[in-house]
Image (tube, grey):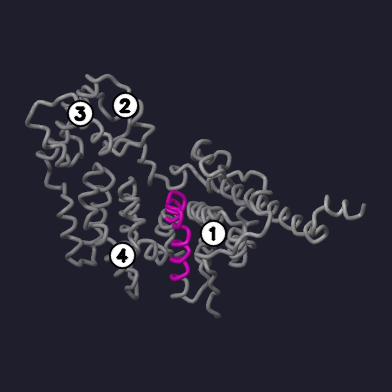
Amino acid sequence: MEPPQRYSDSSPPPPARGGRENKLLRRKVPPGAGSGPGPEDAAVDGRKPKFHLNIKTLTDDMLDRFASIRIPGSRKERPPLLQLKQSHSSTDWSSPPADVVEFIPKPLSEREILALFEKMMEDMNLNEDRKTPLREKDFNTKKEMVMQYISTASKAGSLKSSRQITAQEFILELKSGATDERLVTCLESLRVSLTSNPVSWVENFGHEGLGLLLDVLERLVETKPQDRVVKRSQHKIVQCLKAFMNNKYGLERIMGEERSLSLLARAIDPRQTNMMTDVVKLLSAICIVGEENILEKILEALTAAAEERNIDRFSPIVEGLQDNSVQLQVACMQLINALVTSPDDLDFRLHIRNEFMRSGLKEILPQLTCIKNDALDIQLKVFNEHKEEDMIEFSHRLEDIRSELEYPFGKEELNMYKQ
């Protein structure tokens, strides 16, 4: 097989005359797919934002916790605010951050209460939409919430059961180099802790723990042959990364680690349906909420992983669409849409879409339309709508070129010349 051709992802071809200016407004938010930024955000640079999906729809339980309080249990199971003092022993809070503890021994002033209130909301992983109504509450309510938060966190930390493990203990276990069932058990416990503990616990683990997780994942990816335990361990690490990036700190750390995208791309394996589903969901989320140059980084990671296997870089994603798992099919279409719709340059969008088509997507699309699944139908609709809009923009560009060739001096100048 010939090695796949590489396209300069970091330097897309310059747009020709009549590019996005002559195109109808691109519909970046598909019906039923959730809301993106408001009109005021889109108006900042005068263009529509890139492809957006409701993050909860995109990644299931990952990143939807941006708007949730990290208290274990469902909403029905959570006790009323006034009962939190009596039920603190059943919660899973870790010890409060050091900057919170320092306020405990002395009476708190109004200014200190308000400062602690902000720290409390940050540690609960609340987004701005959830913070706003809490900030509007009266001072006495805020003070009561802060005192209950401090009491709950500190008492939960002093009443830890033998099964609760500190962030440092997880770090030491990851350093041990275990690769058997012991590692699987450790990673499953770590996933639960990353999901249930406050952001301060995640930060405490992440300073050293993220690098260790990536070290273990790299070692497992390179292990040949891969037995059942190795494959399970890989998936557990992906799930830990999924839980770790479920907050602003974790997301920024993941995108800041140069190896993270490369290892995730290498972990794409259609033979491991469940793990691949989680991996492509993570890449989709990172592509959508990441910084401006994140698309180039993801494409470079996919290209490097494909070159190691001597295959086309999009082949594993297209192969995932042929799996019997609808969840994997939906996740793969989400990643395809995220990659195709992210570039602002029309030529770049056309190039990525055509590359997917050449990798087998053209033959698979008719089969996907026969599957009756609402989530998959949404992704197919997004793909087709953006494809049609790009064709309209491309036809407008060709029309501009034709007009320039027919009337090189412009129609008005031509009429003056005839007179």
Residue 135 makes an appearance in the image: yes
Instruction: Give the residue type at disc 3.
Output: Val
- Judging by the rendered image, the residue that carries numbered circle 3 is 146
Q: Which residue is drawn at 28% across and 51% down?
A: 191
In x, y percent, where is residue 217? 31, 65
- Judging by the rendered image, the residue that carries numbered circle 1 is 321
Residue positioned most to the bottom: 1
Q: Which one is earlier in the sequence, the residue at label 1 or at label 4?
A: 4
Mark 1, Cα crowd under 10 Å, few <14 / some 14-19 / many 20+, is many
Instruction: Give the residue type at disc 1.
Output: Leu
Mark 2, Cα crowd under 10 Å, few <14 / some 14-19 / many 20+, is some
Mark 2 or 1, closer to the camera? 2
Q: Residue at x 49, y 53 (%)?
A: 331
Mark 4 or 2, closer to the camera? 2
Side (left or right) of 150 relative to 53: left
- The range drawn in magenta is 283-305
- Judging by the rendered image, the residue that carries numbered circle 2 is 134
C-alpha gap between disc 4 and disc 2: 40 Å
Mark 1 or 4, closer to the camera? 4
Instruction: Give the residue type at disc 2.
Output: Leu
C-alpha gap between disc 2 and disc 1: 44 Å
Residue 361 makes an appearance in the image: no
Vertical side of 124 occupied by 308: above or below: below
Numbered circle sitting on residue 403: none
In x, y percent, where is residue 288? 47, 50
**Residue 302 magenta:** yes
Side (left or right) of 15 relative to 91: right
The quarter of the image holding the N terminus is bottom right
Q: What element carries label 4?
A: helix
Mark 4, Cα crowd under 10 Å, few <14 / some 14-19 / many 20+, is many
C-alpha gap between disc 1 and disc 4: 25 Å
Side (left or right) of 299 relative to 235: right
